[in-house]
Amino acid sequence: MNAGPTAILDHLASLADTTRSRLLLLLDRHELTVTELCAIMQLPQSTVSRHLKALADADWIAARAEGTSNVYTMTGRDEMDAAARRLWLLVREQVGPSPAASQDQRRLQRVLSERRTKSQEFFSSSAGQWDRVRDELFGDRFHLAAVAGFLDRAWVVGDLGCGTGQVSAALAPFVARVMAVDGSAAMLQAARKRLHGLENIDLRRGDLEALPIDDACLDAATMMLVLHHVPEPARALADHRALPPQTRWTAPLADCLYQWYCDGFGAPGQALGSSEYP
């Protein structure tokens, strides 16, 4: 962001419009498409796109391609100059409680819920062919990249978003216990068939944003091709209750190829583009 002597005036001009302030409130914590923003704000696409361009030109937001769409999010705090950070905190405090912003937040929750529903429908419909398609896209050994980095015979490892249990099966011989969590009943049913006979794997159904695992129960955790489908990735990454401090966990993603496949099935992709989280 521009940090010159007139920067504060440019920032004030960008945030003077109520619609742009509402957009930033939504994009402050979420990645959203134009279509989702239109549904939340109850505005036509031309209006939303015009204000997004103004915010992008002023470096308040960033965009990235995802399939045939772009997803938008607010520029990170560390990329803002000091004046922009202070101004945004003030604007957020004043605009956040407004009736329009409150209605936006309620509609945002409905949009996130729809994402979750579409993701569940996707996995329910593709569970029977998931292993074949995944192997075609990534090969049958891609998941072992997570194993080499952290293995200890005494560890309890979480396979978060376990799907059909391929990663759990690979981890099980090398650790004391695997706690495998997935939100799809169909995926867990397929995992039970695959993992039959492996007694150190505990399958559980639940959301990654609220893990069904006791506090500080895990020594390490992995997420494989999961965060694309989590409605609120930041919440999933922030739920560290089951992980002691300094726990290692990896979330390798193959964004472009996987997104192409998900688009074909109509699943809601939310790829984050990063490969490891401390």
Image: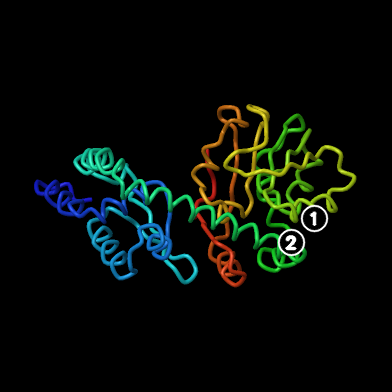
Identify the amino acid type marked 2.
Answer: Ala
Quarter holding residue 114? bottom right
**Front residue of this view, candidates 34 and 168:** 34
Instruction: Please give the name of the residue rendered at 63% of the width and 38% of the height, measured from the top-left corner.
Output: 211
- Marks 1/2: CA–CA distance: 7 Å
Identify the amino acid type marked 1.
Answer: Ala
- The tally of labels here is 2
Which mark is first along the chain, 2 or 1?
2
Residue at label 2? 127
Q: Would you place residue 238 above or below residue 76 in this image?
A: above
Residue at label 1? 190
Q: Residue furthest right?
A: 197
Residue 111 in the image, given as x and y percentages of width and height = 48, 56
Instruction: Please give the name of the residue rendered at 38% of the width and 63% of the height, measured from the top-left corner.
Output: 38
In the rendered structure, the answer to whether residue 76 lies left or right of residue 212 reads: left
Badge 1: how crowded within 10 Å, few (<14), some, or many (20+)?
Answer: some
In the rendered structure, the answer to whether residue 271 lies left or right of residue 163 reads: left
Cβ atoms under marks 1 and 2 closer than 8 Å = yes
Q: Residue furthest left?
A: 5
Residue 124 in the image, given as x and y percentages of width and height = 71, 60
**Front residue of this view, candidates 17 and 86:** 17
In the rendered structure, the answer to whether residue 124 lies left or right of residue 197 reads: left
Q: Would you place residue 112 above or below residue 278 in this image?
A: below
In the rendered structure, the answer to whether residue 133 lies left or right of residue 278 reads: right
